[in-house]
Amino acid sequence: MINPKGLSDRYLRKFRLRTTLVVPFVLQIVAAVGLVGFLAYRSGQQAINDVASQLRTELSNRITERLDSYIEIPKAINRLNATAFARGDIDVSNPRGEHLFWQQMQNYPTLSFIYCGDEQGGFFGVRRLSEQDSTKVVLQFSNSETNFIRQGFGFDERGDLTTQQIGSFDKPFDPRVRPWYEAAKTARGEVWSEIYLAFSTLFPTVTASFPVYDQTNAAIGVCATDFFLPQELSIFLQNLEIGKTGTAFIVERSGRLVATSSQEPMVTGSGEQSERLLATASANANIRETAKYLNTQFSNLNQIQSVQQLDFKLNGERQYVQVVPFQDRNLDWLVILTIPEADFMSQINASQRNTLWLSLGALGVAIALGILTSRWITYPIMRVSQASEDIAAGNLDQHVKPSRIIEIEKLANSFNSMSHQLKNSFHLLKEKNEALRIAEENYRSIFENALEGIFQSSPDGRFISVNPAMARIYGYDSPVEMIANVTEISSQVYVDPQGRKEFQRHLDMYGKVHNWEYQVYRQDGSIIWVEEDTRAVYDPSGKILYYEGIIQDISERKCQEEQLKRQLEELKIEIDQQKREQEVAKITQSDYFQELQAEAESLRLDDDW
């Protein structure tokens, strides 16, 4: 009689495998068809957001890269001029070195003024006559001989000064009270001034300044470089393609404009009443409304410390905004981009009807193919599954029969090969584990029973491991005690702490030391001589991981060497004494000495008479 329960079990097993193969695939297609309309609707908006984000990021990066290139030039020139000032190649009070400034103005047309001031109130620099004509430059200087009234002289085409005076100011000029001078002295280093209106032109100007010191580190002056922001930054922003109607502008944290892509002036008023324009007072609606929106989002612009991607509506139209902080030392600006959503809508033309019908057709075909495919692959996959379970249970001797399906046959062949390799690998692993165990025991025996001290130490001066012989040499009861107590090798072990530095320097150069002899402290404070052979162990990147080596106590040998030296010295003294006695004997036995002695005897007899 047929067992109904057995039939049910077999049916359920086949059904579950087919479900695993077919149902997930069918559900994905159904979900795709159900969501295709929604995704098609959302894709247009997402495309706009993505394009807007990418464009904002790209444009912001271009602006900040240009700013980086602008600010690096004046800083480099200041360092060069400060060096020349300190060496005397540039003299402010007795004008000298104008050819250096002239050459720099020729090489960098973006600069507007290069100059230095000294502690005596002198001023010396070269500037362009106007923003419009960058080819004409003039030397300006003031000192005690001019009553500190700035005077100007032109250059010829070769950079030589002409005798014709070009302009003269009617007010004394003291660079020491100017913002760029005071800021550099206060910072005692490279610094940017606040944006200010230039003394002579009333153009918004920012100055990079650098203090100059003599050999005694006393301040002797400040060198600085200006560039006019409307000419340098605004022209770049105006030429930048920001969508179709987008705008870009740069503001200080105070909200005053630094540069803008619009054509509007950034200074209001005239003469001494001139002042810089706030972004919220801009005539450009995009700039003005974006600035107001940022003021409502952030109570203070100083709160913006990272890149912000925002959006708001202007006259019912969505505006995409990106704010990027730009900082260099005390220079702290915000680069702001505003791009209307309308600039992207013309690019979105999506048709969803064909996509929907194609998805429905694909759904029906996918279901039919899924059912047919499951019938082909069910049985061979089950055979592979059963063999895998047997291997997991510890029976490694498994073999799967080939299938008529090429892919399944490859899977079966791969499985059979894997089974064979796994069986061999387990056998080989067992042999290698046994060999490794024996090797570890041998190494541990050598390490523990060696007569020489064996150690590993870190580059920062701590022992990582030491053997018992090492601990005995240094007077410790155990390796654990020595590792715990020695926390600074250079001061606790080395009698000469500089010896540790020389040891590490030698290892850094050659990677090992051989027969390295030096004196060390034992735990009780006594001093012994040791000889060390050590090598440095590196990681794959070439960084030192630790040192490992062997140490021997050579105190007895050193003592014997000292005794031998003393014996050699004593022997040398004895040999020298014997040599002198031989020389004296040789002289007294010579004929000449005998004659002298006889003559002396005769003289003595004469005296007796």
Image (cartoon, helix red, strand yellow):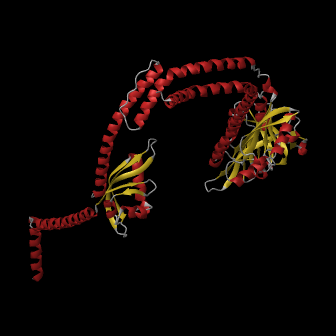
Count of picture labels: 0
Residue 94: give x, y in percent of width and height: 71, 47
Q: Is residue 89 visible?
A: no
Q: Residue at x 36, y 55 (%)?
A: 455
Residue 379: give x, y in percent of width and height: 48, 24
Which quadrant holds residue 46? top right
Q: Residue at x 42, y 25 (%)?
A: 412
Placement of 210 over or under 128, stated as above or below: below
Q: Is residue 15 left or right of residue 1?
A: right
Which quadrant holds residue 320? top right
Residue in the foreground of this view, choosing between 297 and 356: 356
Residue in the foreground of this view, choosing between 519 and 574: 519
Residue in the foreground of this view, choosing between 584 and 251: 251
Q: Is residue 382 visible?
A: yes
Q: Which quadrant holds the C terminus?
A: bottom left
Q: Is residue 361 left or right of residue 204?
A: left
Residue 119: give x, y in percent of width and height: 72, 53
Residue 606: give x, y in percent of width and height: 10, 79
Q: Residue furthest front?
A: 1
Which quadrant holds residue 295? top right
Residue in the foreground of this view, choosing between 478 and 124: 478
Q: Residue furthest bottom?
A: 608
